[in-house]
Amino acid sequence: MATAVRTAGRSPVRRLAGALHRRPRLRLSLLLAAPLLWLAVLYLGSLAVLFVSAFWTTDSFTSEVVRVWSTDNFRALFTTPVYRQVVLRSIGVALAVTVLCAVIAFPLAFYTARVAKPRWRPLLVVAVLTPLWASYLVKVYAWRLILSEGGLADWTLRPFGLDGPGYGLPATVLTLTYLWLPYMILPVHTALEQLPDTLLDASADLGARAGRTVRSVVLPLVLPSVAAGSVFTFSLSLGDYITVQIVGGKSQLIGNLVYSHFELDLPMAAALGTVPVAVIVLYLLAMRRTGALSSL
């Protein structure tokens, strides 16, 4: 009786708080409802609309979208040589950027995590993050000036009888490597920082030299973090289309094709847009076997 009177005397907010306190699963469900709704409706819903619209067609005379189911867009995607070349070129650029980022990131991360003095390590990490604070377009246009004829690249290489790369796929790979390099350095730095000193000491006590220790001890333990960083560098490079427009010269990647078809042939643009999604899903499945997803 007294409990019922106390319960009746409480405000609705206090009764609701008490009910949520007694039901932790309900409380967790309410906390996750908004982000899960955003994920399901805005993100997964937009991908579903993209996939569905890829099966529509466009009237060649009026350029209006005809909502009739057809596989013509995907058939053209696999049978047209230009589309195949652009898709393969885009994957090749993304892989090249990923490899370059891994090659550059490992020694830098090793220095910041294991060699530099402890008091300097936070400052070095901030230095790695500093390029991310600048505008994307500012960085890309800065590289356009560097790679232009008579620019810094030409001025630096001319005494050696060489010319700068100019505009094209090499410039695109170089610029994308600069843009996404911090995303590779950070997970590798974290893995190296957490590497137990006892493992390195044990390797040295067993007579292993520095190179053997790196190959047999450090690399196997850091490989999942490298794979985790590659998820960012690969996916960001595969979907990029602005960099190639600015420094790529006449080169085209799949993002450029999606952009160019958006106004004239929306269903074909949607079909082209499904290619990076499918490639990234396959890449994530491959990286899952390395333990990369648990390192993100």
Image: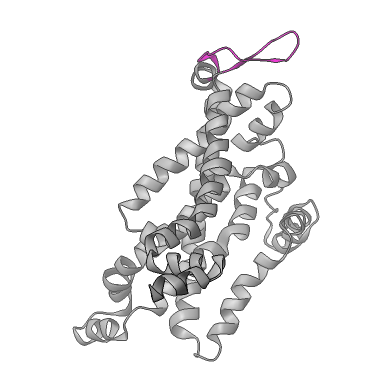
Q: Residue at x 58, y 24 (%)?
A: 53
* Quarter the C terminus occupies: bottom left
Q: Quadrant of residue 41?
A: top right
Q: How many marks?
A: 0
Relative to 21, does residue 254 appear above or below in the rendering?
above
Farthest residue in the front direction?
Answer: 1
Expressed as whole percent of the image width and height from the top left, the position of residue 226 reads 41, 62
Expressed as whole percent of the image width and height from the top left, the position of residue 21 reads 42, 69
Q: Residue at x 62, y 60 (%)?
A: 178
Q: Look at the image and give the residue range highlighted in magenta.
A: 56-73
Expressed as whole percent of the image width and height from the top left, the position of residue 69 reads 53, 13
* Quarter the N terminus occupies: bottom left
> In front here: 12 or 185?
12
Relative to 126, does residue 148 appear above or below in the rendering?
above
Q: Quadrant of residue 82?
A: top right
Residue 87 inside the magenta-drawn segment: no
Q: Residue at x 18, y 83 (%)?
A: 206
Expressed as whole percent of the image width and height from the top left, the position of residue 218 reads 32, 72
Relative to 133, does residue 30 appear above or below in the rendering?
above
Q: Is residue 238 visible?
A: yes
Q: Is residue 89 visible?
A: no
Residue 57 is left or right of residue 231, and the answer is right
Residue 229 is left or right of residue 177, and the answer is left
Q: Quadrant of residue 151?
A: bottom right
> In front here: 40 or 121?
40
